[in-house]
Image (spheres, grey):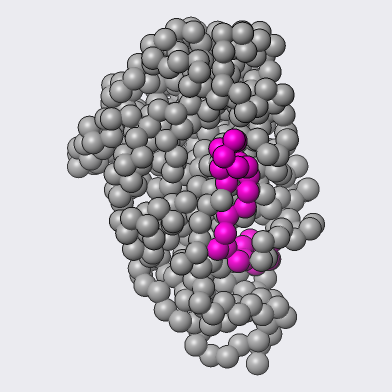
Amino acid sequence: MDIYDVVIKNAQVADPEQEVMFKANIALLNGKIAAITSEDIRGKVEIDAKGCTVSPGFIDIHAHIDGNINCGELSLVQGITTTVGGNCGGGPLNLDKFFYRQNKNGFLINQLQFIGHSFSLRCSVGITNPYIGATENEIRKMKTILEKEFYNGAVGLSFGLEYAPGSSFEEVIALSKVASKHKKLISIHTRLRAPNDLDSLREAVRISEITGALVQVSHLVYQYGTGVMTEALDIIDRARDRGVNIWADSGMYTSFATGICTSVFDENHIKKFGWKLSDLFIASGSLKGHCLTRDLYKKLRNKKENAVIICSTGIENEIYEALLKDYIVPSSDSGASPTGNMGEGHPQNAGTFPRFFRKMVREKNYISPIEAIKKCTLIPARILGLKNKGRMAVGYDGDLVVFDLNTICDKSRFLGKGKPDTYPEGIHYVIVNGQIVFENGRIKKGVLPGRAIEMN
Ligand SMILES: [Zn+2]
């Protein structure tokens, strides 16, 4: 009888491609799924998964982990085995070096990277004012860098147009055409010039229409879950009906988090959106736990501490309305605290995927377990063009999560109501490339099988 590396026995196996769940034993060998069988098989390590579901590992299509180990840890414990960084126009450049370093040192989970326009590319050609468009010469330089990064294996190009509102449409299209030429994705944090600005979504549709590139609209609840989700979904539905290749993701929370020094918290922007300073909550650094006052606002902006600010704008039901669409997948939008400390930031960093199962499957009964699993695995794998992930079949990557559908839930909370990085419950094992990384509430020390994946 074959001896496998790891065998998971008595599991309820979830196959998102066939949309079925069935009892079987799963074997992993050399990092891959080697057998899915009713036969009694043997492994060097054996897990009894009685009462649990085994699914392909979750794929988080929108995050900002970018090699940060603390943040990667909080993704792992929620069952995420592959994360996509460099979103919202930020993240590292020189991916050849980034990938080399990540793969040399190892990481907990697999990583894909976008190349960010609105912070990273613009900064690299010397643009410091977010309110001005790039010159022809600067656009040419950004195109050259972008092309080089696509050869380095970036999965696509990301925009954070709300953070660089001066970016001209010409600039955006010029770069998007480079992405399209290389058959790369474009993720768009939309321009959102005012509350409920649906023209910003129409712009995302046009980018896909003009260039033919696959467009992934970022964290829909934070952009349009403010009373206009129905209209926003209608715009995307109609575009998809015309054949536009547009998809979206959404978080599970109604409050977004971003840095105090970004243009989102410029005085004019705060005024336009009608936010009161007292509604803006400091979630990192020495002043964490306080709401902004005029003095604190000035202090943080002048010191350029880039504290994380949490701003509540959304309507809970509009999250579910979005995630009921089969082209919309859950995403965490996780990012590291600028201080690098744990115990800070947004509970989405540790809670998004378990919360998705708790809310949408168990409490509200909006979707079935297998539909939920498909949204966390196969659909993002297809969007990203990941051929070896997101499926439950022999030969696919050994990224698996063993969890209990009856108990999986988020335990992370906003500061003041608990800790933003408390591990979720109900997830028993997370396996990355055939190796157990998380086991019964603990991360295994020194096990770093995650790969930085070059997409070519
Ligand atoms: Zn964003």
**From what the image shows, is residue 439 above or below residue 4?**
above
User: What residue do we see at 72% from left, 24% from top?
Assistant: 286
Q: Nearer the viewer, residue 133 or 344?
A: 344
**From what the image shows, is residue 334 above or below residue 361?**
above
**From what the image shows, is residue 252 above or below residue 434?**
above
Residue 118 seen in the current view: no
Q: Is 433 part of what is drawn in magenta?
A: yes
Q: Residue furthest front?
A: 417
Where is residue 63? Give x, y as percent: 54, 39
The number of discs equals 0
In the picture, residue 211 is in which quadrant?
A: top left
**From what the image shows, is residue 186 above or below residue 442?**
above
Residue 290 seen in the current view: yes
Q: Is residue 309 left or right of residue 270?
A: right
Q: Main secondary structure of the magenta part?
A: loop
Where is residue 240? Give x, y as percent: 24, 41
Q: Is 178 part of what is drawn in magenta?
A: no
User: What residue do we see at 30% from left, 23% from top?
Assistant: 196
In the picture, residue 319 is in which quadrant?
A: top left
In the picture, residue 70 is in which quadrant?
A: top right
User: What residue do we see at 44% from left, 12% from top?
Assistant: 269
User: What residue do we see at 61% from left, 8% from top?
Assistant: 295
Where is residue 450? Give x, y as percent: 67, 54
Where is residue 30? Give x, y as percent: 67, 71
Image quarter (top left, top right, bottom left or bottom right) of the N terminus: bottom right
| Chain part drawn in magenta | 412-437
